[in-house]
Image (spheres, rainbow, N blue to C red):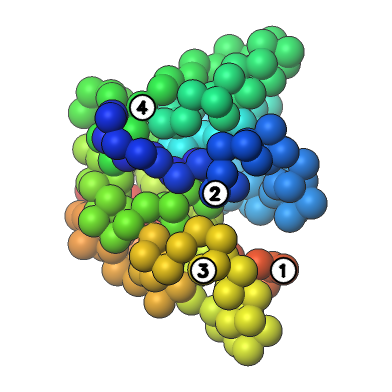
Amino acid sequence: MSGARDAGESFVPALGKSWLTPLYDSVAMLSGERFFKRRLLENARIRPGHDVLDLGCGTGTLALMAKAVCRQARVHGLDRDPEILSIARRKVAVSGSAITLHEGSATSPPFADGSFDRVLTTLMLHHLTTPQKREALAGALRILRPGGELHIADWGKPHNLAMRVAAMIIRYVDGAETTAANLDGQLQMLVEQAGFVDVEETQRWMTPFGTLVFLRAVRR
């Protein structure tokens, strides 16, 4: 769930500052992380034999949940932030789950074409500038197999006054440049422009931090 850029470039840590990284899981728990990640996994319908990637995996919570949902799936996580990956590796080791974690950029995922049946990403894209979002979505398309699915849960356009007020927190903490496309409601359009088909917003949730949207898209 942390930001990602090409090797050698800076990136945005999950809570905006590296010194806050050890607190990430506690903050995520308070935000209801497991509820929306569980819903994302329900939408993804992971099956035995699927190769699954958590893009911007952060501390590994979604990857662990995906493996618990389907033990016969092969689950991978990718994140640019070595500090947050170290937390994920400890959690995976304690769980005993067969999950492979990789350090690398979401804008240039280090996998062969057609490696995955599902690419999942939660609260990562809003850390990227719009050009980086385009790169990350193009990378997700490339590494999916034909018929494979992309599932996103991330901040979207506030759909009422309360959500507009709440979204001001996200804009302030994560920056206007990176959150602009999300909060302007452009995420679905960017997914379509990347070449995905059957792109749909499956759900929209009100949260203390703004509108959370769920998107599903398919590689032709």
Question: Disc 4 vs disc 2: which is toward the camera?
Answer: 2
Q: Amino acid at mark 2?
A: Gly
**Residue matched to label 4:** 104
Q: Three-letter amino acid code at disc 3?
A: Arg
Choose the circle earlier in sequence order: 4 or 2: 2
Residue at 56% in and 61% down: 173
Residue 171 is labelled as 3
- Crowding at dot 1, Cα within 10 Å, few <14 / some 14-19 / many 20+, comes out as some
Q: Is residue 49 left or right of residue 114?
A: right
Q: Position of residue 99 (x, y in %)?
A: 55, 17
Along the line of sight, the residue nearer the viewer: 10 or 50: 10
Q: Earlier in the sequence, mark 1 or mark 4?
A: 4
Front residue (pair 41, 124): 124
**Alpha-carbon neighbours of circle 3 within 10 Å: few (<14), some, or many (≥20)?**
some
Number of residues whose C-alpha sits closer than 10 Å to that of mark 2, classed few (under 14), some (14–19) or many (20 or more): some
Which residue is disc 1 drawn over?
208
